[in-house]
Amino acid sequence: MDRVIRYFKNDILKHIIYIGVFWILIGFVLYPAFNTFLSSLKSQDGLTLKYYKDFFSNKNNITVVVNTIKLGLATVLVCGVIGTGLAFYVNYFDFKYNNIINKLLLTPIMIPGVIIVIAFIQLYGESGLITSTIELLFNLDKHPYSFKGFYGILFIHAYTQYVYFYLNVSVSIGYIDYSTIEAAKNLGASKLKIFTSVILPTITPALATSSILTFMSGIGSFSAPNLLGHNYKVLSTQILLAKTNNYMEIASVQVMILLFTGLVFLTLLRHYERSTKIEMSVKGKAIRPVKIKDPKKRKIYMALAGFVILTIILPILTIFLLSFVKPGTWMINIYPKEFGFDNYMKIFTKSRVFAPFKNSISMSLWATFFSLVLGVPCAYIINKTKFKAKGILELLVILPWAMPASTIAINMINGFNKPNIFVGNNILVGTYILLPLAYFVGIIPLMVKTTGVSLNNLNNTLIDASKTLGASWKNTFKKIIIPIISPGIIAGAVLGFIRCVGEYTTSALLYGVANKPISIAMVNALYEFEIGLSMAYGVLIIVITSILASLMMKLRR
Amino acid sequence: MKRFISLLLVMLLAFSLAACNSNDVTENKDSEKNEENTELEEKIVVYSTHPEDLLEYVSGKFEEKTGVKVEFINLRGELADRVRAEKENPQSDVMFGGASSLFIDMKKDDLFEKYVPAWSNDIKDIFKDEEGYWTGTIQTPVMLFYNNEMLSEKEAPKDWSDLANPKYKNNVLSRNSLSSSARATIASLLYQYYKDDNMEEGWNFINEFDDNVKGYYGSGSLQFQAIGRKEGAVSFSVLNSIIDNKEKNNLPLSIVDAKSGSPVITDAVAVIKGAKHMNAAKAFVDFVGSPEIQAELANKFNRLPTHPKAIENGKAWMKEAEYKVMDVDWSVVSKKESEWIQKWASEIEAE
């Protein structure tokens, strides 16, 4: 009897969760996006495909679409090579400084995109620090390279987005079963064979997830194409242009094309991921880091890694350096000469200065909290249950990926500028909560995916065992599932939090007088010809996110 | 894991309490006011395109004088979109700044409340809406300029048409099509051909200009830095930015008084229709365009006033009016701008 009641209770709880999850996803993801879809079809005399026809009959528009896809694919390729390589370097081989290196490698993600782009221009632009130094050293009379257009954008994407590969692959390397490798070795398998049939399948979910993440941010990124693209146009900049020109139909068509591109890529990768899915064995044995014994090899390896790491920390050093440059001394000279605390003084003596810091942190915490509440059950339902509508659920969850930040913002405005039934008939535009909700929508896929990577490595036998032994659905979740997947959850939460703290594009469209975030304060300085001041804001963002992120990471165990 | 969750919750609570108690308190009281009341509300919300230190200055002065608290944000290019999006439930009371062509456009969408401040009687008709929906407080000329260590006065361009001269090939730097000053400039230049019914030549000009352009910049800071570091010699920008960079950042810049004149954007102010703090909003418009405040903005922020008395009390160069004004009909430009800029950006700039 007791068990029947418990079972019944669990069932109700399960249904409440299902309904809640769908309510949130439909209300905050699907309904707003559907509004945008409608506006791409709406004309004075009913629904029409006219705007799509017009769009594709112009060859310039086709170039833009091709540019966008090309950029997305190249971003995946470059980030995949760098991120996976680094993940193996840190986790598979045993070196002294791996711990510090690991932290350094995560830093690019803590810096808001705009600031990174500026730092890169200061380093590699036509009169940048590195460019000029190379010219001086080799006595060149021509610029050694042009940091513009496609390759310029790609360089920045590689820098900002390899972290997704690095992080996800790192997590999944932890799940490589060493006993299988040993067994394979004993049976005489070649190194290549071990890699393709033991290691690769284990990291495939991580590779697929990261590919999707980088592809989406590759096709949706705005700061880099806007500041570096010059005549290399992509959809995200064209959307803003159409919007500025008040051509809402064109903007909606472009948004839909971007969304469609994203969905196609997503479907392809999901297909690939499914076809290679394997079940983890129960008695996994974690791999031990391997020592490279040959001193020559060791040196080459270290030199190579040293170079990569230098490239990675250079922009961060630049941001720190430039934040100390005295205002007004450096728009002409290439090497800064006068330093001081002027920029920091200015930040801290300005009135209304602390509000942006407070706003950013509290809004990001809200978004992270929402994403945990929604993301963990979603990931579980998708990966571990036989729920009938889980295909739809999965589509809803990853839909925000196919939307660049500005699209999410536009959808939020369209969805919530009139009374909306999903939020109790309130108007949310202009309220404090709208921006955290937009952040939340943006990080749903990240949260579900990183949790999913861990869940994929969770063996069903354990769950079945727990159920057979009479543990409730709730207890199984709490005692078995959560502990095993918590590294993935925490990684997702930290990543999501960090993404929100420095988020600029959505913020610019949705912030109001009550919740101006720090990224806006930073970019405002940039618009007022104070590069040093905006760098100082950048440094403060990096410091805050590092402190909070390491605090969260500490509590991992 | 448990500790992780509890830390998250504690931080959430702490920051939310800190962030929330400052807002929302005044909301309820304000909505209870009746129409007849002329008493000023406790606060107003200003959406603007002006830089923060200017807004801080104006707000400080206004709070001092009236006791009304000013909350502002600088929305730049997003301003019009935002006001449109909030039409059903306006969050702002005043729109302060933005080109008159934008105001003309937005007036058609019924976004403004008619209000004629006293000071508007003294300013020229070109600076205000004839029906009183918006009024100009600042003139913003867009001027040609060059790095005078790279070009002598003789070599420097004399007029906008020189931007298409092959001798400046790869020596012209421009903002991109998302910049409001670049948009206004390109549209004004095209308007010169449009009024003679000669658009074909106009597009030829833009094409040749594009051939000369070395880079389209997405940020003013990067544009001026590139000029300062001699990546290119010739560019154009709003006058106060050029002066700021000469004075604050010590760039060697010379300004060109173009032969055919420079386009002068009028920065206007308007009361938002359905504003929740209507009386204070009107008081703010009265205040911000008054000759005293216009003169202070002129002296502190290099903003050229619209009010003759403020020009009198402004900086020396403002009195001399040392530049010619380009003949631009902004009501025509406001109709055509989007179409022209879309073509420029997606067909010419992209190549």
Image: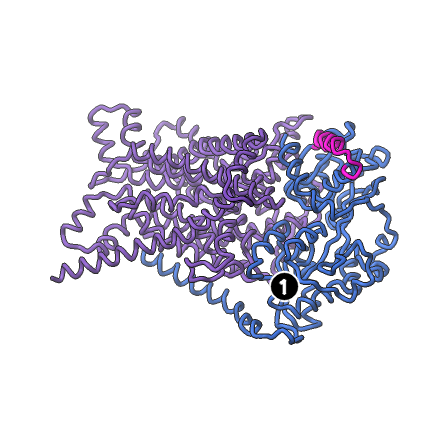
Chain colours: A purple, B blue
Asked where in the image residue B301 lies, by quadrant, the reply is: bottom right
How far across and how far down the image is residue B62, in percent? 69, 68
Camera-side residue of B103 and A395: B103
Give the magenta-colored segment's residue range.
Answer: B194-213
Q: Name the residue at the right extreme.
A: B320
Disc 1 residue crowd, few under 14, some 14–19, many 20+, Cα 10 Å: many
The kind of residue tagged 1 is: Asp
Query: Can residue B16 be seen in the rendering of this structure?
Result: yes
Residue shown at the point (53%, 34%) measured from the top left: A53
The residue identified by callout 1 is: B93
Is residue A151 shown to the viewer in this render? no
Instruction: Specify the subunit that label 1 lies on.
Output: B
Q: Is residue B160 left or right of residue B182?
A: right
Q: Residue at x 69, y 43 (%)?
A: B337
Q: Is residue B221 left or right of residue B327?
A: left
Q: Main secondary structure of the magenta part?
A: helix
Q: Which residue is pictured at 41% across the width and 42% down the height?
A: A102
Q: Secondary structure at mark 1?
A: loop
Q: Nearer the viewer, residue A220 or A182?
A: A220
